[in-house]
Image (cartoon, helix red, strand yellow):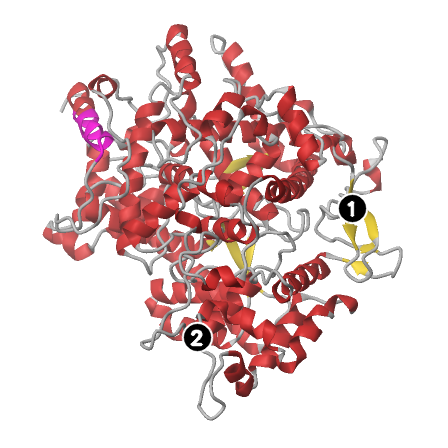
Amino acid sequence: MSKDTKRSSLLKRRDGLGKAEKLTNANGSDNAPAPPPAYDAAVSEQEQAQQPISDGQILADATDTENANLTAAFENLKLTNLPVDPNVETCLAHLKLLFAIQWMKEDVGFADGLWGLWDAQAGPVNPVLRGKPEKLKEREREEKKSEEEEAGPRMEEKLSDKNLETLSRIREKRWAVFVARAVDRYETWWKSLTRVLPGRPLSEADMDQVNSPAYADFPTDFNAVMAWTDDMLPPLDVLMVWHTHMLNPRAFLEDAMLAGLRQVWVTGMPWDTVNKAIDTDFNYTVSDACKTRWTHQTGLAWKNVDDPLTKKIKCPRCDKLMEIPWTTCGLPEDYLPGNGPPVLTGHGYGDSNLYHLCPACNNIICKELLSVAKFVQDTQALLGPGNRPMPGTVLDPKKGTPTGPPVTSRGVKDLTAHTFPNRMLKSGCNSIRTTITALTKSSSVTMDHVRKEIEAVLADRSNVRVIDAKSLTKRHSLPPESRIAIRKMMSRYWENFSLFALDLCGAVMRQGIFVEKMCKLGWLHSPSARDTMTRLLTKYLRFMEIMRRNPTQVTVPTLDVDLAWHTHQLSPSMYYRHTVTWAGRFIDHDDKIDENTLSKQFEWTSKVYQDMYGDVYSACSCWYCEAIRSAHISTVGKVLGLSKQEKVAENFHSSGAASLHPPDTSAHISSHNSVALVPDPNHTTSPHKSRSLVTARLAAMQRKRLDTAYAKARARAEKKGRPPPKREEVYYDHWGYPYLYAAPYAYPLWWTPGMYCGWYPGYVVACGGGAWAADAVVLMRVDPELEVVVGAAAADAVEGVV
């Protein structure tokens, strides 16, 4: 087959994928309700004729006129501020927003002296090695495109320069403090919206009322649209945090319901207004009227860096108003590095080791105390006249929807399992109301004290009967659903002292991994950008179908699928309607997944996708993706010539598609939520140690599986006469310093524990709470050979109350 014929064949196949398709099951019959409404995934004949050679590849002979036309196309996106299902226009607008966020991040990290963090604190660094913002690199590449590119410094030089490594950490610390302040500013904006928009906080009475607009009908009232104007936009740092918040769908719905912000929930991201504020150089520009309105509404400066360097809070014990510095890591500009490397942990409000003495009562203010204070405040809101339910008790844990009390056969409302924690805290059993609300008056309290108080209540079965209003003469124990509800409530406070259902500081850091990868793929600068968006929307529909058919499995997206998925979630009400109508549940977007579980489930997702659609899932030629495809191939089926997976993998190479998807510009596994699973340092008992052993064994097994699959991929390539995939060392440029990238699914090894606000964003604790219980069940499901040992760990986790 000639090159022209091969290329023509490939483009025809791609054109077919560019059109909207009807989802069918594995045997070809249609058994799924149509997604409401159908996406705009079709392309015109003219667009099909211009199909690119490769996603994101800018053609070598592109003229300045074509690039100008491309710019004009982005300036004239057909957008609206109304909630919509994802389409080409919103995906492109989303990419523009991601670029603006990434450029802001680089501006902050490279701002020498910000927060008193000076480059000079790292010691002398060769100017050639210092690194520079990516947007500056792009500008220099554009200016020198006709010149021969200069050879950069060798990798060995960078790796051996410890001062350069310290410099990269200083830059990361600037960004970490900026993010902590951005989350705090977002919280202030969120509170201000409750004052200027209609609505009121959720109450328990709303949850009992049929078709309550504040509860049952909250997610589906599509008439409650917010009328966005150009002067209503928040600053970009706040917009970034809001963006991350919405990418945790169930958490965002719960927070919006508790605050009564229905218009914010229904409308979501105002794409037209946001897009107009971002120019073609990805600068975020608003009017003076917008800045004035922001300051008047929130009392904050427009720019993050212009706000005070201290945070005002009240002492949880004595209510004394005090000011805590955002970071204590700042040093004078003339600091001499000879005194040792700068300490980047710190004791400020935006540091990891918050430590501040109350000037009135000498109480130690720390992050653990603030988590308890949040729990106490929420308990008081439950017990008060507003009867606001506790976070984590609002949505049905299985469906993720607001579910009122069931009605018995006698027409009487029964008790709802997921509201059990509210009833328990109101019951007065074991004097829990008095004990909980008095916790902040003690010293050195943590959420572990809260856990023990709850366990003491539930240890007595008579208390459970009282809470659930059961006759004392009947046997009644705590249902599993109620145990899950307690763990769900407690998850809102473990390692989180913010107003929201999750720690948004860590979530923004993890989301930043995805943002950076999207920018590096270069889709937005490619003439084929619209075609790329069309194809990924089709692929996203397929991905959603896999999730619909496999509700008990963790389905892992590729980067291109994740862009469409994220874009959908930024119109929360439309995403809710689509998933609930189509899949029967409000599909969540996991914020943290253990890296080994992520890789194992990506392998499963890839196999199912290729079985259902006869096409590769991860169109990438890196060693990891080649290994994943090789793992799908059955030895028996291959020998008999019956392996569908073998044919799919081989067609990827024989069609020429593999050559168009090099490892550095392809959309393989999306791993921004990848974290390390670590043991809880607060638990040293035998059951918890056994969980650590299980975790280590699972990680070793996953590495062995990948090694075996990679060996198969090499052998298959050599047999077909192709160069085998190289397992090359890949380095990630972290603020100018290279870190070895273990694998595409791995969590960010370049993050430094102890440097971020609150808790480390790169891990999840394997404790007795819901996180470990869920992970253990997942691991047991995907690793049947470890069923006995993992099953025991899971049972132990479920047995623990919180």
The residue that disc 1 covers is 312
Q: Which mark is residue 6?
A: none
Q: Is residue 793 above or below residue 16?
A: below
Taking the magenta stretch, the answer to whether it contains residue 117 is: no
Question: What crowding class fits label 1: few (fewer than 14 Cα within 10 Å), some (14-19), or many (20 or more)?
Answer: few
Q: Identify the image quadrant of residue 735.
A: top right
Residue 16 colored in magenta in the image: yes
Whichever of callouts 2 and 1 sits on the residue coming sooner in the sequence is: 1
- Which residue lies under the disc numbered 2? 480
- Secondary structure of residue under mark 2: helix
The kind of residue on which mark 2 rests is Pro
- Pick the quarter of the image with the N terminus: top left
Residue 391 vs residue 115, the one in the foreground = 391
Residues in magenta, as a range: 9-20
> Residue placed at 65% from the left, 31% from the top?
294
- Residue extending farthest to the right is 360
